[in-house]
Amino acid sequence: MQEKPQDNLTRENCKLLAEHHYPTTPQVLFIDGVASERSIQGYKSITLSQAIARYTPREIHFVIAETDLSARERIYEEIKSSGYNLATLIHPSIILGRDSLVGEGCVINKFCHISSYVTLESNVFLSPFVIAQSHCVITQHSVIKPYSIIQDKNPESLYVIGTGGFAAEVSEYIQQENAFGISGYFDSINASNHQKYGFKAPFLGNEKEYAFDNANVLIAIGNQNVRERIYKSLKDKGARFPSFISQKANVSRHAFIGEGAVICPFVCITSNVIIGNNFQANIYSYVAHDCVLGENITLCPGVKINGNVHIGNNVFIGAGAIIHPGKNTRPLVIGNNVTIAAGSVVTKSIQPNLTVFGSPAVEMTLENIKRRMR
């Protein structure tokens, strides 16, 4: 039997995918619309019924190497009704965002970009260079053409607390990535900023006067103490705090981040990191392996927190500050309510309630300022 040519999933690509994901048994067979088999050894052609007769479900997984939607659905139903399983193949070149779900039997081709919180239902075929933006759902048996951009037409809405410069930045990130719809802005201090930054959603006044029961809220205020106060107040009113994690950030699957986080583009959070609620990380900052960060922490642009650092609650770290690594058995510890001035280099642990500056960082006292100016 002459095999049907495949537009997007070549034999070589299938073989690469199979060997990458399934180096041992069960064997992976590739089935197309004329029900031919492509095994990773020799690509011999048999019918689907012959393959089912020859192999038990424990010996074989199927991949549907077919781009016709009706054919994919027909083959899928036949395989499932016979009690067999489908393999899910993901090309090693793709980007797969945080908390995205990929169903059984999906094939994701090279250079696809799957953003955070995307759901691919079973038997989805993504051609090369597909972009799936945050929160979108690609339904069962879908076949997506090359270079397609998939968006969630109705993203979840939220209210933004704050109308300052950081709120303006975060609003643009959210809108560019279609992560959420913005229903309105609150600010109890400076209402004039709403007009200054030209926000599209309306200004709604002081958040203290609004009932936030079950409403989604994002706090776009850099001051960690103000943010903590607002978070606790609105939490008591029943507000919910989804996190915004930019598609352009790199967050390890082995990191844990609490609710209400704002993680801007080009932030990097690596393996085995634990971060508490109400966290903010501005552009180009990073948190390295085995760090533990408390609640209400602000990282300004370009902050570098190296491995094995433990940070308490309500800590503000200024732009460009560098925190040296601790040791696996003795982490570098920064206490609660610490402020680290911009450009500081922290080489040792810091006691709670201090403000430090300089390189190496020392407590900000009049004597230390004078000494550094000499």
Image: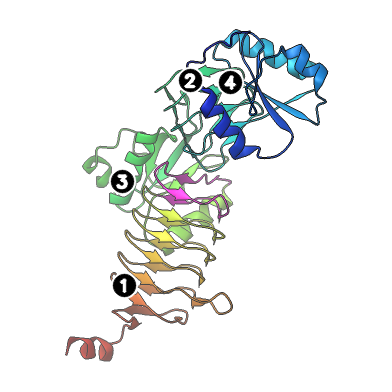
Residue denoted by label 1: 341
| Quadrant where the image shows the N terminus | top right
Q: Tell me the residue at 59%/31% (across/down).
A: 89
- Residue carrying label 4: 139
Q: Mark 4 vs mark 2: give the one in front.
A: 2
Q: Quadrant of residue 27?
A: top right
Q: With respect to residue 16, does 302 lie above or below?
A: below
What crowding class fits label 1: few (fewer than 14 Cα within 10 Å), some (14-19), or many (20 or more)?
Answer: some
Eyeballing the image, is 111 above or below 240? above
**Residue occupying image coordinates x 56% and y 74%:** 328
Quote the CA–CA distance across marks 3 and 4: 33 Å
Which quarter of the figure is the C terminus placed in? bottom left
Near-viewer residue (202 or 71): 71
The secondary element bearing badge 3 is classed as: helix
Q: Residue at x 42, y 41 (%)?
A: 247
Identify the mark nearer the N-term, 3 or 2.
2
Q: Is residue 248 part of the magenta span, yes or no?
A: yes
State which mark lies toward you, 1 or 4.
4
- Most distant residue in the left direction: 374
Q: What's the amino acid at mark 4? A: Thr
Residue pointed to by mark 3: 169
- Identify the residue under disc 2: 8
Residue 118 at x, y percent in the picture: 53, 33
SS category of the residue bearing label 1: loop
Q: Is residue 257 visible?
A: no
Specify the amino acid type for callout 3.
Glu
First in residue order: circle 4 vs circle 2: 2
Q: Reading the chain from its start, which is encountered first: label 2 or label 1?
A: 2
| SS assignment for the magenta stretch, majority | loop
Q: Position of residue 38 (x, y in %)?
A: 63, 21
Looking at the picture, does residue 335 appear above or below residue 77?
below
